[in-house]
Image (spheres, rainbow, N blue to C red):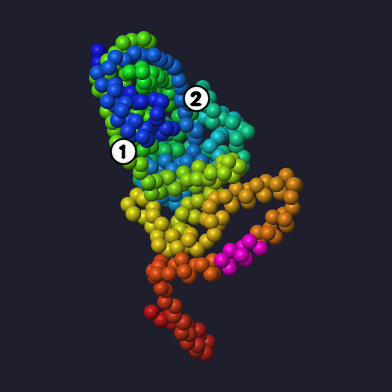
C-alpha cells in the first residue's frame, strides 16, 4: 500500500478455513488485476480484549510444557515430580488430572506465594509483584475431584540443593501458580477490510496494552510461551481512507504431511484424542473423557512402547518402528482406533446410571477378546514377516548347587 507505511492483506473471498487460495489460476488473476490500483478501507474495527492467566497444572499439561521447554520425557517429569513431592515436599500431589484449586486454599495463597518468591526470586525480578487479593478462575470447587491441581507448597528451600531438572520443574509449577495473582493480559485487536479493484482483502493486527500475567513469561522461549501469536503492526488508519495497492504477490506453498510426534505433541494427542475422530458422537464422548490413559499411566504407556521396541527416538521426534507398524497392521481397525475407548466409556457411564448391567458389558467384551486373539494369531506372523527382533536375546543359566553336611552353598555360573 502507498501513501503510508506498507502493510500486507490477504485475498478474502476465496480463502479456505486455513487462509489458503487453492486455485492457482484464480490467485494469479487476482495478482495481475490489483497492482497499482486504487484501494479504500471499507471496514475498520478495533476491540479491547483480554486474556486470563493460564490454569495451574495437572500432570499432563506440566509434562507437555516441560517437554517443549526442557526436552524432558513424560517419565522424566513424573519421576521429578514424585521427588519434589515425596522427598523435598515442595509441590502437592503430582498425579492429578485437575487444573483447578478449591476455594479453601485461598487462605494459604499469601504464605505459598511468599515461599515461592523466597525460593525462586528470579521469577518475579524486575516485574510487578504478585497480588494475592486477585482471584482467578482457577479457584473452583465444582471442578476439583479427589485431587486438585499441582501447585507449590509453603516450604522454603535453597534450590541449589535440588538437581538442575528438579529446579526447572519446580520453577515451572511455581510460575504457573504465581500467574493466578496477576491481572489479565490486555490488548487491542484491529480488523481491516480493504476493497481493491472490486475485490475484498483483509488483515488483522494486535497491539499490547498491558502484559499482566505475561510479564512472568518474559523469558520464555518461542515454543513454551503461552498462546504466542505474531501479527504485523499497522499504521494509523481511518474508515474510508483512500490508498493505493503498489503490487500483488503470489506466495506458493505446498501442503505438508503431519509432523512426527514429539514428547509434547504425543501427550497432547493422548489427552485430546477426540481431534483424531470424525464421528461427531464418538468425538463428543472422547472430549468428555481423559483421553488415552490417565494422568498416572500415560508416561508408563509411552515408556513401555519404547521398551518393547514399538517406538524409537530420532532426535526430538518419536517414530514407529517396523515392529510397531507390523503390530498395528495385524490388528483390526476397531482395536487400533480410539473409537473403542468411546464405546467403553459410554457403556461404563450407562452402568454408573444403572441403565445396564456389568455382566452385559463384560460378557461381550470377553467374547470379543477371544476373537481378537484368534485374528492376531492369524495375521501377526504375516504382518511381522521380515521384521527383526526388537530385543536382544537373554541367556539363562541353571544354578549349580553344592550341598555339604551342615552347610549349603550355591554357585552361579557366569
Tag shown at residue 132: 2
Against 37, is 313 above or below?
Answer: below
Q: Nearer the viewer, residue 81 or 31?
A: 31
Task: Report whether residue 83 is seen.
Answer: no
- Residue 229 is situated, as x and y percent measured from the top left of the image, at 37, 30
Q: Nearer the viewer, residue 60 or 359?
A: 359
Seen at 67% across and 46% down, the residue is 349
Seen at 60% across and 42% down, the residue is 281
Seen at 37% across and 35% down, the residue is 22
Provide the residue span drawn in magenta. Answer: 367-375
Task: Report whether residue 38 is seen.
Answer: yes
Magenta stretch containing residue 90, yes or no?
no
Dividing the image into 4 quarters, which one contains the C terminus?
bottom left
Tag shown at residue 369: none
Against 222, is 199 above or below?
Answer: above
| Residue 175 figure quarter | top left
Say left or right for 348 vs 193.
right
Circle 1 Cα neighbour tier, 10 Å, few/some/many (<14 / 14–19 / ≥20): few
- The residue positioned farthest toward the bottom in the image shown: 405
Say left or right for 251 vs 344.
left
Say left or right for 318 vs 110.
left
- Which residue in the structure is indicated by mark 1? 253
Circle 2 Cα neighbour tier, 10 Å, few/some/many (<14 / 14–19 / ≥20): some
Q: Nearer the viewer, residue 99 or 269?
A: 269
Q: Nearer the viewer, residue 67 or 379?
A: 379
Seen at 36% across and 34% down, the residue is 23
Q: Main secondary structure of the magenta part?
A: helix
- Residue 341 is situated, as x and y percent measured from the top left of the image, at 58, 50
Amino acid at each position: 500500500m502507498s501513501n503510508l507505511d506498507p502493510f500486507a492483506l490477504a485475498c478474502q473471498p476465496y480463502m479456505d478455513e486455513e487462509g489458503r487460495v487453492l486455485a492457482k489460476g484464480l490467485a494469479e488473476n487476482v495478482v495481475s488485476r490489483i497492482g497499482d490500483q486504487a484501494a479504500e478501507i471499507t471496514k475498520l474495527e478495533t476491540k479491547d480484549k483480554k486474556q486470563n492467566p493460564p490454569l495451574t497444572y495437572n500432570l499432563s499439561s506440566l509434562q507437555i510444557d516441560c517437554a517443549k521447554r526442557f526436552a524432558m520425557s513424560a517419565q522424566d517429569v513424573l519421576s521429578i515430580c514424585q521427588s519434589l513431592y515425596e522427598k523435598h515436599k515442595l509441590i502437592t500431589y503430582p498425579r492429578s488430572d485437575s487444573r483447578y484449586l478449591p476455594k479453601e486454599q485461598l487462605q494459604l495463597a499469601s504464605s505459598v506465594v511468599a515461599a515461592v518468591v523466597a525460593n525462586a526470586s528470579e521469577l518475579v525480578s524486575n516485574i510487578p509483584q504478585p497480588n494475592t487479593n486477585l482471584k482467578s478462575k482457577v479457584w473452583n470447587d465444582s471442578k476439583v475431584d479427589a485431587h486438585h491441581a499441582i501447585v507449590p507448597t509453603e516450604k522454603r528451600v535453597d534450590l541449589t540443593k535440588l538437581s538442575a531438572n528438579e529446579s526447572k520443574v519446580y520453577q515451572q509449577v511455581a510460575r504457573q501458580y504465581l500467574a493466578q495473582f496477576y491481572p489479565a493480559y490486555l490488548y487491542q485487536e484491529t480488523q481491516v477490510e480493504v476493497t481493491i479493484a472490486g475485490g475484498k482483502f483483509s488483515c488483522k493486527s494486535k497491539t499490547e496494552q498491558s502484559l499482566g500475567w505475561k510479564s512472568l513469561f518474559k523469558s520464555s522461549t518461542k515454543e513454551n510461551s503461552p498462546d504466542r501469536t505474531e501479527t504485523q503492526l499497522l499504521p494509523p488508519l481511518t474508515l474510508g481512507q483512500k490508498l493505493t495497492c503498489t503490487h500483488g504477490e503470489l506466495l506458493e506453498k505446498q501442503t505438508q504431511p503431519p509432523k512426527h510426534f514429539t514428547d509434547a505433541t504425543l501427550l497432547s494427542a493422548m489427552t485430546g484424542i477426540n481431534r483424531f475422530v470424525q464421528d461427531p458422537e464418538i468425538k463428543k464422548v472422547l472430549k468428555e473423557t481423559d483421553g488415552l490413559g490417565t494422568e498416572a499411566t500415560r508416561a508408563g504407556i509411552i515408556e513401555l512402547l519404547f521398551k518393547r521396541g514399538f517406538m524409537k527416538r530420532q532426535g526430538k521426534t518419536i517414530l514407529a518402528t517396523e515392529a510397531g507398524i507390523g503390530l498395528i497392521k495385524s490388528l483390526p481397525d476397531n482395536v487400533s482406533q480410539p473409537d473403542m475407548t468411546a464405546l467403553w466409556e459410554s457403556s461404563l457411564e450407562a452402568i454408573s446410571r444403572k441403565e445396564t448391567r456389568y455382566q452385559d458389558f463384560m460378557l461381550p467384551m470377553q467374547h470379543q477378546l477371544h476373537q481378537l486373539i484368534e485374528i492376531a494369531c492369524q495375521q501377526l506372523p504375516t504382518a511381522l514377516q521380515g521384521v527383526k527382533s526388537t530385543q536382544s536375546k537373554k541367556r539363562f543359566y541353571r544354578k549349580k548347587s553344592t550341598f555339604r553336611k551342615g552347610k549349603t552353598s550355591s554357585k552361579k555360573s557366569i
